[in-house]
Amino acid sequence: GLFVATIGFAIGLDAGVFNKGLSRLLPWLERVERFSRPRLGLLFGPVGDRLLGLVCTVLALIVVLPIPGGNVLPAAAVAVLAISLVLVDGVIALVGYALVAASGVAIYLFAGVVFRVAGEVLERLREVVS
């Protein structure tokens, strides 16, 4: 908590805003901690941890892309996977991987729409130029 507070205040976050956000977040984290226990350990260890790290790295690259609303699911997936790693809870990790899959589907659909619209725009430009 202190590290997050220090970073938040260093970038100009108001203490009242920080405390309000923290007070809203803590009950959720406490529920997750009550629910959580070490399980499905095969998702962790040398191979599982590296896979999780690779997935989070790819998601981090997606989060920084300028896609309106396109970073919400990947960011949520990274957060859930990070919590699963800290708590060594495979069930939470599976929820995180489900969010990864949902992110992939959403990005695929968004890319399809973008390419379709771009194709239509190019086609109309060709008609205008011709």
Image (cartoon, rainbow, N blue to C red):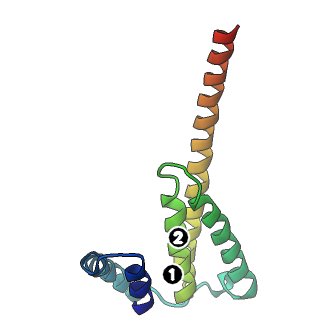
Identify which residue is drawn at 44% across, 83% down.
7
- In x, y percent, where is residue 48? 70, 81
Residue 21 is left or right of residue 3, and the answer is left
Q: Specify few, some or many for label 2: CA neighbours under 10 Å numbering under 14, 14-19, or 20 or more.
A: some
Nearest the eye: 18 or 12 = 12
* The residue positioned farthest toward the top in the image shown: 130
Q: Is residue 122 above or below residue 109?
A: above
- Residue 65 left/right relative to 14: right
Query: What is the quadrant of the C terminus in the image?
Result: top right
Q: Look at the picture and state if 35 lies above or below 100.
A: below
Q: Residues within 10 Å of mark 1 (few under 14, many from 20)?
A: some
Left or right: where 40 falls relative to 7 = right
The x and y percentages for residue 32 are 40, 82
Q: Residue 91, can we see it?
A: no
On the image, numbered disc 1 is attached to which residue?
83
Residue type highlighted by circle 2: Val
At horizontal 62% and vertical 42% (from top left) the residue drawn is: 111
Element carrying mark 2? helix
What amino acid is at disc 1? Ile
How far from the left and from the top, in percent, is residue 31? 35, 83
Q: Which quadrant would the N terminus be assigned to in this image? A: bottom left
Task: Inspect this view and state whether residue 106 appears.
Answer: yes
Q: Which residue is mark 2?
A: 95
Q: For residue 126, what is the image quadrant?
A: top right
Please tell me which residue is depicted at 31% across the width and 78% down the height of the picture: 18
Q: Classify residue 9 as left or right of residue 64.
A: left
The image quadrant that residue 45 belongs to is bottom right
